[in-house]
């Protein structure tokens, strides 16, 4: 009798795990984010407080539009540490987007970022006065935080709101050697595996950005969104070799604020500004390699705006799935 009960409990636990995993994959797909294990963990040394302020600022426009009071405090104001900026960017985007949905006029959101006494962990405390956060939302965020070797605690106070505390290790020795990026990203974000079209490269058949295919987007513009994306791509192409072409310069050339540019690029492509720019640069690098397979990797890196060939190689592999040398070799063999 006891054995049957144990077997029954084991079956129930297994079913619960399967249901949670399916829900996790479904939720991730709906957000158009790849699962963390699909791209791996890649930490780099950054000013974490500056990164958090910039990432949070990108969604502040949404809070302002809904009449939500948003405040952020970092102690200290500047703090260097090792984080996966791409993964942390997703975590913040999911959390703050969900918060914006749950709050209305008169809502309040407070973020406090601080380190422990040993300066080897960072805590991100997010509080709001809205309804209880959904279990599905917490599930995907918990998974991402755990993948970053961190912990997350959440508490709902009846009629007062939610408090979520994320704790992440920020010391270099907290991660494996293969998880460390060889160079710090000046714009914080590292590109993931996504295809973007530029006029000099063949369009991948069947590929879609958002709900519109790239082939449709690159036709003569028949919407404001298509024209915006065409101009954005042209701006990157016009400054393809300029390693100092940052988001402020990009936004200025587009005639809008950085937050407006960020939100529009995210809406149309699912990417942030830096990823969008870097992916186009990597695709241009592929074209250069095809046109002249005898070029050195460092020469290609400099031509597409990378100061550090090692960081270029890392970014190239993240976008194409192979090292630049491997890609060039395939081009040579293919003739």
Image: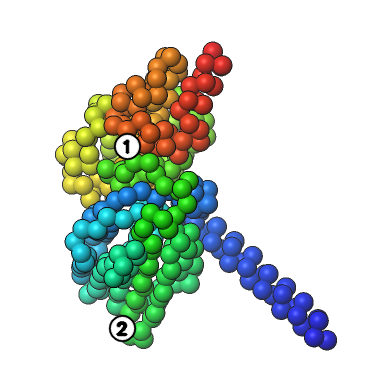
Left or right of residue 188: residue 195: right
Please state which of residues 34 and 302 is positioned toward the viewer in this rendering: 302
Tell me where residue 124 appears, x and y as whole percent: 32, 67
The disc placed on residue 277 is 1
The residue where tag 2 is placed is 160
Q: CA distance from mark 2 to mark 1?
A: 41 Å
Residue 294 appears in the rendering: yes
Dot 1: few (<14), some (14–19), or many (≥20) neighbours within 10 Å?
Answer: many
Tell me where residue 233 appears, x and y as whole percent: 31, 32
Task: Give the vertical position of 276 relative to 58 (above or below).
Answer: above
* Residue at 62%, 68% in the rendered image: 17
Task: Give the vertical position of 265 relative to 300 (above or below).
Answer: below
- Whichever of callouts 2 and 1 sits on the residue coming sooner in the sequence is 2
* Residue at 43%, 64% in the rendered image: 150
* Residue at 43%, 68% in the rendered image: 151
The quadrant in which residue 237 appears is top left
């Amino acid at each position: 009798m006891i054995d049957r009960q144990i077997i029954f409990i084991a079956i129930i636990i297994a079913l619960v795990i399967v249901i949670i995993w399916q829900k996790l994959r479904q939720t991730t797909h709906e957000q158009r984010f790849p699962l963390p294990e699909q791209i791996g963990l890649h930490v780099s040394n950054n000013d974490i407080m500056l990164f958090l302020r910039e990432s949070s600022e990108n969604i502040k426009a949404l809070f302002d539009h809904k009449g939500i009071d948003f405040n952020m405090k970092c102690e200290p104001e500047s703090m260097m540490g090792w984080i996966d900026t791409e993964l942390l960017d997703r975590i913040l985007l999911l959390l703050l987007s969900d918060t914006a949905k749950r709050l209305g006029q008169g809502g309040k959101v407070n973020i406090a970022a601080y380190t422990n006494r040993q300066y080897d962990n960072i805590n991100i405390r997010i509080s709001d006065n809205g309804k209880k956060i959904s279990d599905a939302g917490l599930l995907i965020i918990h998974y991402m935080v755990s993948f970053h070797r961190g912990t997350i605690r959440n508490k709902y106070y009846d009629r007062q709101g939610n408090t979520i505390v994320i704790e992440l290790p920020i010391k270099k020795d907290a991660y494996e050697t293969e998880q460390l990026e060889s160079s710090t990203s000046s714009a914080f974000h590292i590109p993931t595996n996504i295809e973007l079209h530029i006029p000099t490269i063949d369009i991948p058949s069947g590929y879609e950005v958002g709900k519109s295919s790239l082939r449709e987007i690159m036709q003569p513009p028949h919407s404001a969104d298509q024209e915006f994306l065409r101009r954005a791509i042209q701006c990157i192409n016009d400054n393809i070799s300029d390693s100092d072409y940052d988001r402020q310069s990009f936004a200025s050339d587009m005639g809008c604020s950085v937050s407006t540019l960020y939100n529009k690029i995210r809406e149309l492509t699912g990417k942030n500004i830096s990823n969008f720019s870097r992916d186009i640069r990597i695709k241009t690098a592929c074209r250069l390699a095809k046109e002249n397979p005898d070029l050195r990797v460092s020469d290609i890196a400099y031509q597409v705006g990378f100061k550090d060939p090692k960081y270029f190689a890392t970014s190239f592999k993240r976008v194409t799935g192979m090292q630049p040398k491997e890609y060039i070799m395939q081009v040579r063999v293919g003739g």
